[in-house]
Amino acid sequence: MIVINNLSKRFRKKEVLHSINLQLENRVYGLLGANGAGKTTLIRCLAGLYEPQHGEMLYNNEPIHKSKSFRQDLGYLPQAFGMFQELTLYEMMDYICSLKNIAKSKCASEITKALTSVNLENKGRDRIKTLSGGMVRRAGIAQAILGDTKVMLLDEPTAGLDPSERARFKNTVNALKKDRTILISTHIVEDVDACCNSVIVIDEGQVLFNGSCEELRNIAINKVYMINEADSDSIVGEKFILKINEIESKIFYRILAKEKQEYQSEKPNLEDGYMCLVKGLA
Amino acid sequence: MWRLYLELKNQRFYYFIPPVILFILVPLTVFATIKGGTSSHFPECGTICQLFISSFAAWWPLFILKEYLNSPGKELLFIHKLSRDSLFLKMIILWAFYVLHVVIVFIYFTSLFDFVWFLFIAIITQSMFMIALGYFLSLLFQNTFIPLIVNFAYSSLFMLVFLYSPLSIFEIGTFSNASSLNKSTVVVIIAFILFYGGYQMEKRLYKNSI
């Protein structure tokens, strides 16, 4: 289990993380937030790339920066992944095995297992630079699970992927999630809905929400309305337009409203709950 | 060493540039110089060797540093700190590897000239300086392009234009005795200072790596 207590990180005068407190167990967490909210900084602090100014991070009650087991158990997928472009996929995996101190005798089986789990077992001899964007992301996940890692930190793993690659990614995560702590940073709410058990919403370096997907959805109960364009001015109180749809030549707004309206409310989805939080309509 | 092998392999076509320079261009140029005149050609050949061999010493190190400084996902190289490679150590190993190549070239030169080993010592110290300079500048600028340009500009300027400048690490002369290595001691000291400066920056690079 990972415990984060009172974590703060500042870059010069700008405080990017403010007193973060979290407990991460063996499940899949979606770390949701807008660009610049502090998701990557939090993940990099956890991975040991940044030293926080305040607070502590513990892995099985041991400080992360001193924990050998955390290093061994850690799999990390950076936001941009694509180093060693001229090596084959197998060689790149071999390099990561060596970095992770995986015994030479186990490397071949570990690499095969990791590549198979992301459906890249036939691409081992291809150079990294010849792989598609989606394949490179999957290769990134494969390197993250090398050595049977127990903790996976995935920083925006679906950024730049087409819908079919995103679906494949979600299936991969679902296949891997057993007995692992997986933290997926993203700003795509759908991805969290599809493969995460829990959601952490972060905004301006602070945790706004930490709970299940259902709980996040419930925040928007009686706050989501689908109304005709002509009726939009009749909404009472603060509102936020989520979507504009055209149905049979009529314009409809999907609206988040802070106060209860006279219209029939809609069943909220995860995005509604998230927007409620970040727009201060909760 | 396995990781270093893969890093060199990752250079693909670019890996072969220094061997081509050392084993084809330098011997051919030296051979052509000897065939083209009548008097002793050793000083001219010394100039050719210093120009080509020393300036290409930093080639492999700079291309390896590029992965650590500029590649997408470079953070991964810093994550597993318990087994992390020291870039400084890699620079020293690459220098030794380059020296092995230079030894082969100089074995060929022993069949052409006397006293080649003073020139050899001058060249390996210059190679060390070039690698140290590349390492230092790369970490200073977080970039390998500027050091590459500085490397070739420095070699060309001081070997072809400002031959007798006190800022030059290159030697002009016959390399017939130990006194022809006057500059080499200073060059080694400066190389160590650059390595030290680079190593201090490398430690910070790992500490706060992005």
Image (cartoon, coloured by chain):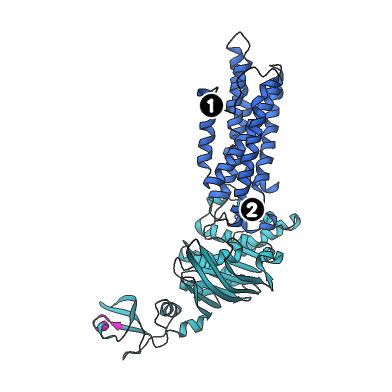
Reply yes or no: does residue A166 show up in magenta: no
Q: Residue at x 61, y 30 (%)?
A: B54
Circle nearer the viewer, 1 or 2: 1
Q: Which mark is residue A176?
A: none
Q: Identify the residue at the far top of this view.
A: B38
On what subunit does the disc labeled 1 rest?
B
For the colour cyan, the matching chain is A
Give the labeled residue for mark 2: A90
Nearer to us in this view, A204 or B66: A204
Quadrant in which the C terminus of chain A is drawn: bottom left
Residue A128: x and y in percent read: 56, 51
Reply yes or no: does residue A228 show up in magenta: yes
Number of numbered discs on residues: 2
* Vertical side of B39 occupied by A82: above or below: below
Give the labeled residue for mark 1: B158
Q: Residue at x 55, y 44 (%)?
A: B138
Amino acid type, residue under disc 1 in the picture: Phe
Q: Is residue A69 left or right of residue A264?
A: right
For the colour blue, the matching chain is B
* Vertical side of B120 occupied by A46: above or below: below
Amino acid type, residue under disc 2 in the picture: Tyr
Nearer to us in this view, A115 or B87: B87
Q: Which residues are magenta?
A: A227-232
Question: Badge 1, how many Cα within 10 Å: few under 14, some, many 20+?
Answer: some
